Amino acid sequence: MRQAQAPEITAAGTDDAELVRRSLARDEAAVRAVMQANNRRLFRLARGILRNDAEAEDVVQDTYVRAFTHLEQFRGNSSLSTWLSRIAMNEALGRLRRQRPSVEWSTLEKSVPEAQIIPFPLASPDDPEKSMAQREIQHVVEHAIDELPEPFRLVFITRVMEGMNVEETAELLGLKPETVKTRLHRARNLLRDNVEKKIGPVVMEAFPFAGRRCERLTEAVLKRLGYST
């Protein structure tokens, strides 16, 4: 009789403590579940700091390698997702400091340049090039978000794109809830006239990280951690 396959583990159906326990025991399914649940958030956070897809992917890989090789340090004081997000932000900020050693985080908020947007007309529902137009509009959104100063960009990504609430964002970024609200308001003001009124919900799909791209990164991390894939 053929042995039945073990059910797939999903982060949504398994608590952090169980995922950590299984990952520490080198349960590949648990490691995969953690990565697949967090890939997009970590990528968006890293990209929000570095504004470069390739470097953001490198940061996500380095984050997982660091996290899974030091997983015993996770104490459960915050969620596993928040713990991973902090590691990713530290990795990304470390790269940014090496690239721009004279730039201090606190000084970035003082400069609020206008987002430089390339106007692009919306395609009609019957337009055969609609999908191409949507991709172009998505690029406009990503460009506009990239133009936000770093402190506002990270708050915008966590609150709007990742759907985190004020308290979660404040905990992740080490801010007061009032500061989160203020920065989000300023970020929206920079984007609204040129982007939000034109394309609204499309902003939720900016910087996708799924499908083959997500799977490729997951496999690369597993290989670095010594799993047979």
Image (spheres, helix red, strand yellow):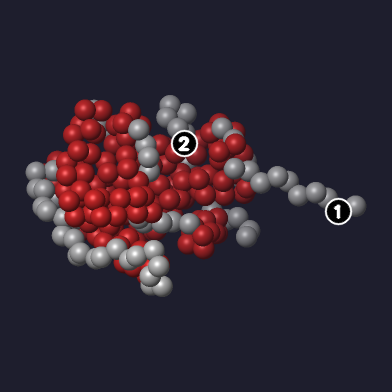
90 sits left or right of 181 in the view: right
Q: Which numbered tag is attached to residue 80?
A: 2
**Quadrant in which residue 18 is drawn:** top right
**Quadrant in which residue 158 is drawn:** top left
Q: Label 1 amino acid?
A: Arg
In this view, the residue in front, 228 or 89, is 89
Q: Label 2 amino acid?
A: Leu
Residue visible at 23% across and 33% down in the picture: 181
Q: Position of residue 33 (x, y in %)?
A: 56, 46
177 w.r.t. 61: above or below: above
Task: Give the mark, 1 or 2, whose residue is nearer the N terminus.
Answer: 1
Query: What residue sits right under mark 1 in the picture?
Result: 2
Q: Position of residue 173 (x, y in %)?
A: 29, 36
Residue 146 visible (yes or no): no
35 sits left or right of 109 in the view: right
Residue visible at 32% across and 39% down in the picture: 159
